Amino acid sequence: MSAVLIDGVAVAKSVRAECRVRISRLLQRTGIRPGLAVLKVGDDPASAIYIRNKTKACDEVGIRSVPHYFDRDCDPQAVIDTILRLNCDPSIHGILVQLPLPPQFKVATILRNISPDKDVDGFHLYNVGALAVGEAIFPPCTPYGVLRLLEHEAIPLEGQNVVVVGASNIVGKPMALMLMQRDATVCICHVKTRDLAQFTILADILVVAAGHPNLILPQMVKTGVVVIDVGITRLPDGRLAGDVDFEGVRQKASYITPVPGGVGPMTVTMLLVNTIASAERAAANLHVSMFPGQIAGSSAVKTA
Ligand code: NAD
């Protein structure tokens, strides 16, 4: 058996075409063009590349991206003040803080100051909770992209054994929640899992997001498995590698995503989808109300 390659570039292209249609309809109907504020602190080269890709993708579909760049040694309060101002700016529908942040920042505090209505990364506690109870507003972009790839290939999820390797807040945990919501039987493994293979061998669908090249070898999967490789590691020779022994595992799998060209293009694309959804919600006057009487994002969060 040689697996069908899931072409993330092609799926992302078709989702972006849908994005353009949604934006032109929204513009025609309401005059609103979706706006994404992009906050970057410092000059991390990888962050610069991610931001360039996101800005380019916004331009491509017609989202207005607005950069806010801060020096590496800036006062975190300056970033919070900007976020609070953007929370109240009706021309901005998404606020993205590029991670990682310098050491003087408490990431959780920064993220909690973003209005849940504009939290297009889906990292605010409110949105995490909404996802956990099956009422996601802005699903985190990477697992959302994985789900779109599985849907695109018409791979059934209900009742399937899905193993997620990696339990981070941005990939593994939300991925597991989204799959549970679709009635899959989900097992989460992480760096402390003993004998990873005894779990991965049971997977009908295996999602790997560990950041560890060649973690998944052919003998660790069953014939016919669907493999989604989220991992991205830059090898010493400059090439990008996923977490799966691609050449070996593709001989046993029914479907597999390549790296690059699998999940990566979908992550940026789902950020566009969330930003458009946010603008549509704003146009329909839909707002998250965290507590009766409270306007979301109206006051700064001080605690970590
Ligand atoms: P992270 O470091 O926050 O989390 C890694 C997770 O993998 C942890 O839960 C850890 O316990 C687990 N893990 C690490 N080594 C393991 C091992 N040997 N066995 C089992 N579990 C192990 O990373 P993250 O932010 O979740 O990202 C994971 C990978 O996905 C990275 O390579 C990252 O670059 C990539 N990533 C890709 C995209 C994309 O768009 N394709 C988006 C986000 C992250």
Image: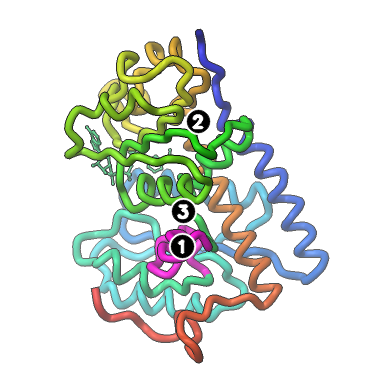
Given residues 263 and 23, the one toward you in this image is 263
Give the residue type at disc 1: Val
Crowd rating for badge 2 (residues with CA inside 10 Å; few <14, some 14–19, many 20+): many
Q: Judge left or right: residue 188 versus residue 153.
A: left
Gap between marks 2 and 3 measured at Cα: 17 Å
Q: Is residue 201 above or below residue 94?
A: above
Q: Which residue matches tag 1? A: 133
* Dot 1 or dot 2, earlier in sequence: 1
Q: How many discs mark residues in the rendered view?
A: 3
Q: Is residue 141 magenta?
A: no
Give the residue type at disc 2: Gly
> Is the residue indicated by label 2 positioned so its CB lies within 8 Å of ligand 1?
yes
Q: Is residue 161 above or below residue 106?
A: above
Gap between marks 1 and 2 measured at Cα: 28 Å
Given residues 141 and 110, the one toward you in this image is 141
Crowd rating for badge 1 (residues with CA inside 10 Å; few <14, some 14–19, many 20+): few
| Residue lying at 74% horizontally and 55% vertically, measured from the top left | 22
Return the x and y of residue 195 as percentages of the image width and height.
19, 27
Return the x and y of residue 227 as percentages of the image width and height.
44, 26
Return the x and y of residue 71 as percentages of the image width and height.
31, 64
- Tell us which disc is closer to us: 1 or 3: 1
Q: Which residue matches tag 2? A: 262
The magenta stretch is 118-135
- Tell us which disc is closer to us: 1 or 2: 1
| Residue lying at 56% horizontally and 32% vertically, measured from the top left | 8
| Residue lying at 68% horizontally and 54% vertically, measured from the top left | 62
